[in-house]
Image: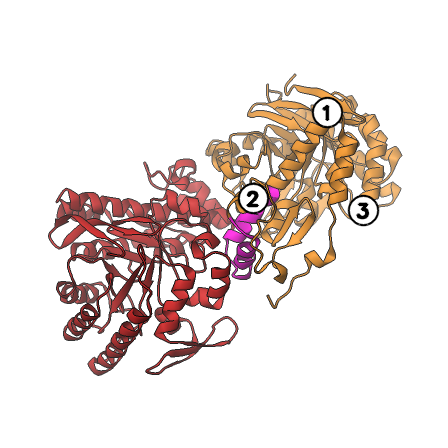
Chain colours: A orange, B red
């Protein structure tokens, strides 16, 4: 087995386990901070590790445009380039092509597009997507897919999904099997249970080291997302890792773990951190809010992150008011720490077969008050 | 003595020693990183310490506008607020009022101005400047001065300097003497040796814990600055620390140490770092230059900073090209480390009575090539 996956314990549909890769073990359920352009924004690599992250995600689309996969390979691969010695998962580029690139065109052979940076034209067939990830040295490569837009009719979703399945087969074929390196397929099919089931069957017959659920968190709302997971999970092999792409907020993650998801990635903790929004067990706080201007308490009592260990809410408030870079640095570290503490809590709860209670307790405390998110310019 | 200053060794006019304050010892010659708004930009406080800095500088002008000295005092003082437990020197606000504030007006009593942030009017008499620094909890407070503009006629410089001397007397009077806390006077007098001598005499008769040389590095050029130092240093008490404000580039610092200066502050290493400019023993490099795009070497071989210990020039180049925050973070850490290594080198050289050789060797290697500073947009 290229990347052994061991499930230690289950609790209902939820599982906790470990996925072994060339660069180390990923404890699941796992949250992967996003390191788009070969850096988790505003974080030193060792600070990312200190939050408790086992694995980070890199974006194939961004890296293929700049600095380019051949250049990264020449410099020793992505791990060495960005000084991260743990596992790295790279997406296939499909999602960013859809959301960022210009003049996108999809044919049977490939997606073609123009760079959002400088207009350069690129052709990305599945084989090149896999080659790029090989050049980067990714521990986990993703098959190229078309991220089906939302909303889509059943016909549109079917056509898109079936193209992704043919690309999945070509991706698998292009992937060079090595010990410690995995390739994951991506389930598509929009919000249509039969299409999701068909997609699972197609991927299983190809055979992947793990299975991702794609095309969610694109505007369909949490309940629809959970419904799609309910319709999808039973059709995935129970002994392989399952990855819900681009998700999500803490309550999204909890709901998905309850449904059997093992891996997550999302820009929310990092992007929110750069925008003065902090995640705490009491919900989200906008640290720009005037109520924090003289608040001597840490963001969250007992949190081991650098922001909470050293600074008051008043100081964090000041940093954002003054436009100081240390504000995004500290809140990013806090949010990533918060997410990793949540994942550790989920792993422990599954191991102790008390996940339902953990989830209920977390969600009862976790309330987003609109007043907390307002910004007061007069502070 | 409120802040004991011990000179261990001298070499020509140069000295190496230690200044003891309430928050620790400052090894001299010392370089103080600038923490304008209660943060050394892009740096965690422990990372600043890790560069080798004993003391940082805070800007009274910025802190009085935002978040305000009373608020910082309420939150436990500047050390606690910004989580820096080493010594802090604060300037008096005079220089920033001149360079940043609007509608500046100077009377015998005070400088009045409008905030560059929101137009609020402030009146800053010397007593308030000292009170603000007391509220902040500064280890070393500076007397309020008028930073004489450059160029200025001898009459203008004399009038300005004499006002500063009257303000120095009021500043000293307002300062509450406590063990471990110092107040420094500031020599003014423009480029006129007789005025500098008169200013030194005035300050000495008031009696300060240390003496700063102000009004330099404002466009007069290095040779004029050195000439002014040559005309000023002999008139300062040899047993008190001497601080050259706002200086400078590495070669400025070396020249000033040779002339007997003990302390420095400057935004150059931090500001340059944020703008892709790196200081090395071979001179300055603009890491955006295309020549670094595939350069696998560290910025500087053997440098212990996080940028050089973990990353290639190619990666740093990529970070700045991609507009990633980690670029400024890493180059700031490198530049501050470079400056502290220079200061340690100067201290060791003075202690070993080989400063002339050290300076000659450093300056022979340290060459700024214009080609290194060019940015190539096509990289």
Q: CA distance from mark 1 to mark 3?
A: 30 Å
Front residue of A290 and B3: B3
Question: Which picture quadrant has residue A267?
Answer: top right
The residue where tag 2 is placed is: A333
Q: Is residue B368 visible?
A: no
In the image, taking residue B169 as reference, residue A40 lies left or right, namely right
Q: CA distance from mark 2 to mark 1?
A: 28 Å
Return the x and y of residue B215 as percentages of the image width and height.
27, 69
The residue where tag 1 is placed is: A352
Q: Is residue B41 visible?
A: yes
The numbered mark 1 sits on a residue in which chain?
A: A
Q: Look at the picture and state if A100 lies above or below B247.
A: above
Task: Look at the image and give the residue range highlighted in magenta.
Answer: A311-336
The residue where tag 3 is placed is: A221
Query: Can you name the residue that lies furthest to the left here?
Result: B12
Helix, strand or loop at label 1? It is loop
Marks 3 and 2: CB-CB under 8 Å? no
Quadrant housing the N terminus of chain A: top right
Front tag of 2 and 1: 1
Return the x and y of residue A18 as percentages of the image width and height.
65, 23
Q: Are marks 3 and 2 on the same chain?
A: yes
Front residue of B354 and B94: B94
Front residue of A220 and B81: B81
Helix, strand or loop at label 2? It is helix
């Amino acid at each position: 087995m290229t990347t052994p996956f061991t499930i230690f314990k289950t609790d209902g549909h939820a599982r906790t386990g470990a996925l072994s890769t060339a660069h180390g073990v990923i404890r699941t359920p796992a949250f992967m901070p996003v390191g788009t352009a070969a850096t988790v924004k505003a974080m030193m690599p060792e600070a990312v590790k200190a939050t408790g992250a086992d694995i980070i995600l890199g974006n194939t689309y961004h890296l293929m445009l700049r600095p380019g996969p051949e250049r990264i390979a020449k410099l020793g691969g992505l791990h060495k380039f960005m000084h991260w010695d743990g596992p790295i998962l790279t997406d296939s580029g499909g999602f960013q092509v859809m959301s960022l690139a210009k003049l996108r065109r999809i044919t049977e052979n490939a997606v073609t597009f123009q760079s959002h940076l400088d207009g350069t034209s690129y052709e990305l067939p599945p084989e090149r997507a896999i080659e790029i990830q090989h050049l980067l040295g990714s521990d986990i490569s993703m098959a190229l897919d078309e991220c089906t837009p939302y909303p889509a009719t059943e016909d549109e979703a079917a056509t898109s999904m079936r193209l992704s399945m043919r690309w999945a087969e070509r991706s698998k074929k292009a992937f060079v099997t090595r010990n410690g390196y995995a390739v994951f397929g991506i389930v598509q099919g929009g919000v249509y249970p039969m299409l999701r089931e068909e997609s699972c069957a197609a991927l299983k017959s190809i055979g992947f080291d793990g299975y991702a659920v794609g095309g969610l968190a694109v505007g369909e709302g949490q309940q629809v997302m959970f419904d799609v997971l309910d319709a999808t999970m039973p059709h995935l092999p129970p002994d392989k890792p399952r990855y819900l792409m681009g998700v999500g907020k803490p309550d999204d993650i909890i709901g998905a773990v309850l449904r059997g998801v093992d891996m997550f990635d999302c820009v929310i903790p990092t992007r929110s951190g750069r925008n003065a929004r902090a995640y705490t067990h009491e919900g989200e706080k906008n640290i720009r809010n005037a109520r924090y201007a003289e608040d001597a308490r840490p963001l969250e009592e007992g949190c081991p992150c650098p922001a909470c260990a050293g600074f008051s809410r008043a100081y964090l408030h000041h940093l954002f008011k003054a436009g100081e870079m240390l504000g995004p640095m500290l809140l990013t570290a806090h949010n990533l720490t918060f997410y990793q503490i949540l994942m550790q809590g989920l792993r422990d709860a599954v191991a102790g077969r008390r996940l339902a209670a953990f989830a209920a307790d977390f969600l009862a405390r976790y309330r987003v008050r609109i007043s907390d998110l307002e910004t007061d310019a007069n502070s």
